Amino acid sequence: MNKLLADDVYKHFSPVRCSSCGTKNGFNRHIFHITGVQRKKQADDATQNMLQYHFLHYHKIKYVFFRAHSKKFYVDSAKCSSCKSTAIVFDISPDYADYVMSEYKKTIGKNII
């Protein structure tokens, strides 16, 4: 999992706020490697809904995020260290969002904002 979290793109998507108490740091991150799901089915609503149901009812994890990396399929989640909620909002770091936007502007050759 350390290799996944060190990836240049993946590391910029992380827990930013607890939906329950508003805390903005102190999250325990949990990443699960999911096997047995065909690659072409990983983005299907039915597959993701079934996995969300499983994580909510068997692991009490409210919010999960799906990721594919190096031909592997993952579920990413976090728990608030303050209130123990699993309703954690993930987002792209502002620095990385700025970088992506600047690269996009270079590609299309004009300002988009």
Image (cartoon, rainbow, N blue to C red):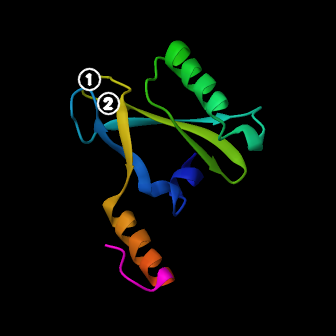
Is 110 in the magenta? yes
- The image shows residue 2 at horizontal and vertical percentages of 55, 49
Q: Nearer the viewer, residue 2 or 17?
A: 17
Q: Is residue 13 above or below residue 37?
A: below
- The image shows residue 11 at horizontal and vertical percentages of 47, 55
Q: Quadrant of the N terminus?
A: top right
Q: CA distance from mark 2 to mark 1?
A: 6 Å
Task: Look at label 2 and name its amino acid.
Answer: Cys
Task: Look at label 1 and name its amino acid.
Answer: Cys
Q: Nearer the viewer, residue 95 or 109?
A: 109
- The image shows residue 112 at horizontal and vertical percentages of 36, 75
The picture quadrant where one finds residue 26 is top left
Q: Which residue is mark 1?
A: 83
The picture quadrant where one finds residue 86 is top left
Which secondary structure type mostly characterizes the magenta part of the structure? loop
Is 28 in the magenta? no
- The image shows residue 109 at horizontal and vertical percentages of 45, 86
User: Which mark identifies residue 75?
Assistant: none
Q: Is residue 36 left or right of residue 7?
A: right
Secondary element at image label 1: loop
User: Tag 2: Cα neighbours inside 10 Å, few (<14), some, or many (≥20)?
Assistant: many
Q: Is residue 9 above or below residue 85?
A: below
Q: Nearer the viewer, residue 54 or 25?
A: 54
**Farthest residue in the top direction?**
57
Q: Over which residues does the magenta segment extend?
A: 108-113
Q: Is residue 42 above or below residue 62?
A: below
The answer to whether the residues at label 2 and label 1 have Cβ atoms under 8 Å apart is yes
Q: Which residue is mark 2?
A: 80
Residue drawn at x 27%, y 42% is 25
